[in-house]
Amino acid sequence: MAAGPRASLLLVAAALAAGIAALLLALGLPLLARRALDAPRYALLAATAAAAVLLVAAGLLRRLVGRPVERLLAAAARLGGGRP
């Protein structure tokens, strides 16, 4: 049951990373069209930013939200909250 909250938090972090990558793509396409930036460097920039957001968001969410939720679920299981 501990995988549930962690998986949800990882999904939120992945969504944040995808949003950042999409934003960078939307902002960078005009630069690519004007040839102010070449495609390989821009792709590397977008991928690096998305990876950084994913790592930071996953770490923060796990630490600030995941651990307290896991403690609450463990306490509920100790109290017998899982029985019908």
Image (tube, rainbow, N blue to C red):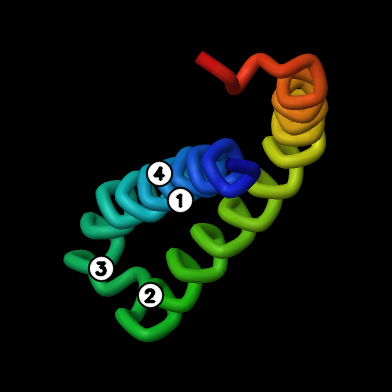
Q: In terms of depth relative to the viewer, which is nearer, 2 or 9?
A: 2
Question: Which dot marks residue 15?
Answer: 4
- Residue at the spot 74% in from the left edge and 39% down from the top edge: 60
Q: In front here: 18 or 46? A: 18
Numbered disc 1: secondary structure: helix
Q: Amino acid at mark 1?
A: Ala
Q: Is residue 60 left or right of residue 29?
A: right
* Circles 4, 2 touching at the beta carbon (< 8 Å): no
User: Which numbered disc covers residue 32?
Assistant: 3
CB-based contact (under 8 Å), mark 4 and mark 1: yes
Q: Which residue is mark 2?
A: 43
Q: CA distance from mark 4 to mark 1?
A: 4 Å
At which x and y percent is residue 29?
Answer: 23, 59
Q: Amino acid at mark 4?
A: Ala
Residue to which mark 1 is pinned: 14
Front-most of residues 43 and 53: 53
Residue 49 sits in quarter: bottom right
Q: Amino acid at mark 3?
A: Leu
